[in-house]
Image (spheres, coloured by chain):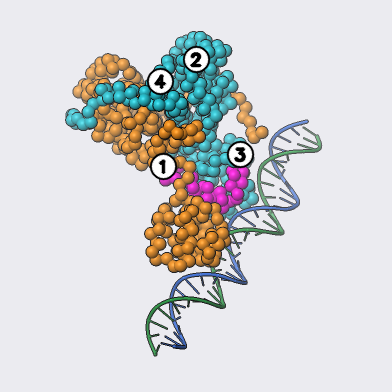
Chain colours: A cyan, B orange, C green, D blue
Amino acid sequence: MKNESNVLAQIQAALGDLSKSDMKIAEVVLTDPEAATRASIAILAQQAGVSEPSVNRFCKRLGATGYPDFKIWLARSLVSGVQYMSQVVDPDDTIDTYPSKLVDNTINALMLARENLPSGAIEQAVNYLHTAQRIYFFGVGTSAAVARDAEHKFFRFQTSVTTHTDPLMLRMLSAGGQAGDVFVFISHTGRTRVIVEAAELAANSGATVIALTAEGSPLALTSDCVLGLNTPENTEDYLPMTSRIVHLVVIDILVTGVTLKRGAPGIEHLAKMKESLLPTRLPKQKKRRKP
Amino acid sequence: MKNESNVLAQIQAALGDLSKSDMKIAEVVLTDPEAATRASIAILAQQAGVSEPSVNRFCKRLGATGYPDFKIWLARSLVSGVQYMSQVVDPDDTIDTYPSKLVDNTINALMLARENLPSGAIEQAVNYLHTAQRIYFFGVGTSAAVARDAEHKFFRFQTSVTTHTDPLMLRMLSAGGQAGDVFVFISHTGRTRVIVEAAELAANSGATVIALTAEGSPLALTSDCVLGLNTPENTEDYLPMTSRIVHLVVIDILVTGVTLKRGAPGIEHLAKMKESLLPTRLPKQKKRRKP
DNA sequence: ATAAATATGTAATTAAATTTCATGCGGGCG
DNA sequence: CGCCCGCATGAAATTTAATTACATATTTAT
């Protein structure tokens, strides 16, 4: 059975393949989950414009034993003030509204990701990265920053790590891959041409290809190991804001996984790295100008 | 209305002046609240060795409208899913435990940030960025990726945007700042020497300095506008994982703020930018429903 | 185009919770 | 010491809510 925590994230994740009535119910629940916990099945049904049994079935489909049970789940996944249902920023928003909207959207994306973490793929990816002789992180546009971040993090291991955004370099390096090389391609949509083509080159070169992208996308199909994430619908309509955050957290997960796999020496190495940063830091307090 | 959160604490507080039956009920509920949320009034009554109406009255005495309502309260004070309080990854963690720990930590950091969003500074920063002739995003190490991301996002406006990680370039550009230039320095600790020194140079050059850093840090003291965030966790002991995520969300907020300030033309421009990305994408495949 | 499968709604049924009312227990006061 | 009052408790009745069973509509596949 599925994880019963975060029904809201679960609903959001399921939004794609829901029936008409279920969609209506989901919308009502996501719009105001707090109200839903107090509503009777009749009220909720009426608000969604569906019949009571539909609501009941909706609950069961999500794994609850029935409506009251569902309400309990809902109540348990309700946390301090964070709004569910991705909120779109509109021109009427003010400084008091849009910042928290954006934060909420990000939190939601993470909660959603948390429900659907591809543990298997992560484990596999960690293994690949752990044993890799050389690692490449490739992403363009927004994902370039993610690749850069990954490079920086993996740089702390002894393995050689490379990032590039230049399409030509990207292709050349990808084509020149060999056994022992691991290529990580990062793309929210999984349909960025240059990335997909590079991934194909890398795959044909005999190297290992890991994809951090949307499930079922062209990029995903070319890869040996897919860190697939289903991000909510509207992300694509807008700038990829939340997806890159999720990607970064996945990077954290991979780094942590490899660190754990390395055991004591790796952890010590991290400590040493931290040590080496100290001279670049200023002492705790210091006085400077103020306008 | 009453304090409906923390029913458990409420019960414990009331333990002193409860009747015999109420005491029995309280004990059962406190012993295993989680089970109580799933039990029917009949089962709970039986477990406590009291009658059903007694349970009902118990609930009402606590302020609930009845037993089901009480269960909701109970469930809400029982936080599920996301764990609060930062959790440290330790060597005994497995693939089933550390990924969600990391996600949870990130979510927590965001929830914390959400509570303490420096609205005033954000508004000010948005104004500065909106009217800037040139914008520089500077960060090193992990923050370099954040700066890169910011550059990429602001690039979509007409303003000239620059990022650099090379210390020399950083100093040169900072020293050469002039009125109309806006420098955004990004540093989790606010004590990275090269960044603080560059910020000082920029400040003395007459340009505007915005800092995305810890409150009260040396970097913060040098800046005209501090986007201060308190990340009180162990980030400094370890790799900065959560802080950069928060920084990225702040970047999102700034981008959004500037976009809103620009009004319709800016929003249209964003739409056009999105449009221009389409040719680089491979065609989308048809959507499938449940198998 | 038609049959099978799936989704949805109506009405009947069952389960659950609440109210009403009767009983029991303990404490003050004649 | 006993009688009565008030509060706590439980049994049964009532009401309310949720679920199941079944009929109808809608979609999907052949």
State how far apart marks 3 and 2 are (Cα): 41 Å
Q: Secondary structure at mark 4?
A: loop
Q: How many residues crowd around disc 4 within 10 Å: few (fewer than 14), some, or many (20 or more)?
A: some
Q: Which mark is residue A157?
A: 4
Q: Secondary structure at mark 2?
A: strand
Q: Which residue is mark 3?
A: A18
Classify residue A27 as left or right of residue B233: right
Question: Which chain letter matches label 3?
Answer: A
Q: How many marks?
A: 4
**Which residue is found at the position 51% from the left and 42% from the top?**
A6
The percent coordinates of residue B97 (x first, y second) are 48, 35
Q: Are marks 1 and 2 on the same chain?
A: no
Q: Which mark is residue A3?
A: none
**Which residue is found at the position 25% from the left and 16% from the top?**
B172
Q: Which residue is mark 1?
A: B84
Q: How many residues crowd around disc 2 within 10 Å: few (fewer than 14), some, or many (20 or more)?
A: many
Q: Are marks 3 and 4 on the same chain?
A: yes
